[in-house]
Image (spheres, grey):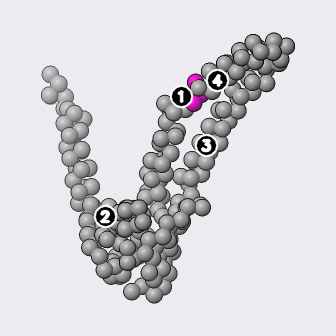
Amino acid sequence: MNKKRVIWWNPYWAHCPAAQKKWALLLNRYSVLCVVAMACSLVAVMAIGIKQIAPQADTLGLLSLLVQIPAIFGLVYLYAIVDRCIPARVVMKEDRFVVQRGEAIAIVYFKDVAKLRVVVFAEKMIRLSIRFRSKTGSRTLRIGLPAELSLKEFLDNFACEKKVLDARDLFGKFSKESLKLSSPVASVSKNDRS
């Protein structure tokens, strides 16, 4: 078993897609437009209602809501940008993983790990998917591994099903196929045009 602590920051390439997925529901065009439309209609209904009940009341204060609502979205967008810039801190102790992002923390004990899947995209791009049992059922945690970590020593810490996939060749095939598809269009000679 591992007797020392290994600490690393989740790599940017592994962290950013997860952060984008997390914020996609709240920060898409449809959600923002719906909230702004609801707020504008609510302000209009409130202004008309107040004018009906108390005609002498000043309703210009309600117009400040039209500035405050975009300001709230601006703060949420700022928080989403900061959330993408600061990745999770991963600590591997002798008996557990601790993944910490801000105030959120995930602890995965090695005894609860059911399956490990390691996908190697490049020498410095290694993704680890940990399938573990929690109180609410089976869950998956995906993190990036640092390049300086020895995979053999790392995988020896676990007594569960382990699967290592090499995606470097697959990635190379995809890029070669896309080049083959685009090359006939790009390499039309002068003789073929006539």
Q: Residue at x 81, y 12 (%)?
A: 55
For the residue marked with disc 1, what is the amino acid? Cys
**Residues at badges 3 and 4 in contact (C-beta under 8 Å)?**
no
Q: CA distance from mark 3 to mark 1?
A: 16 Å
- Alpha carbons under labels 3 and 2: distance apart: 33 Å
Front position in the image: 98 or 132: 132
Q: Amino acid at mark 3?
A: Val
Question: Is residue 122 visible to the viewer in this orientation of the structure?
Answer: no
Q: Secondary structure at mark 2?
A: strand
Which badge, 4 or 1, comes first in the chain's sequence? 1
List the residue tagged with mark 1: 34
Q: Secondary structure at mark 3?
A: helix
Separation of residues labelled 4 and 2 (CA atoms): 50 Å
Badge nearest the viewer, 1 or 2: 1
Tell me the residue that label 2 is attached to.
119
Q: CA distance from mark 4 to mark 1?
A: 12 Å
- Which sits earlier in the primary sequence, circle 3 or circle 1? 1
Residue at label 3?
Answer: 76
- Nearer mark to the viewer, of 4 and 2: 4
The CA span between labels 1 and 2 is 40 Å
- Can you tell which quarter of the image residue 104 is in? bottom right
Q: Horizontal and vertical percent for residue 183?
A: 22, 39
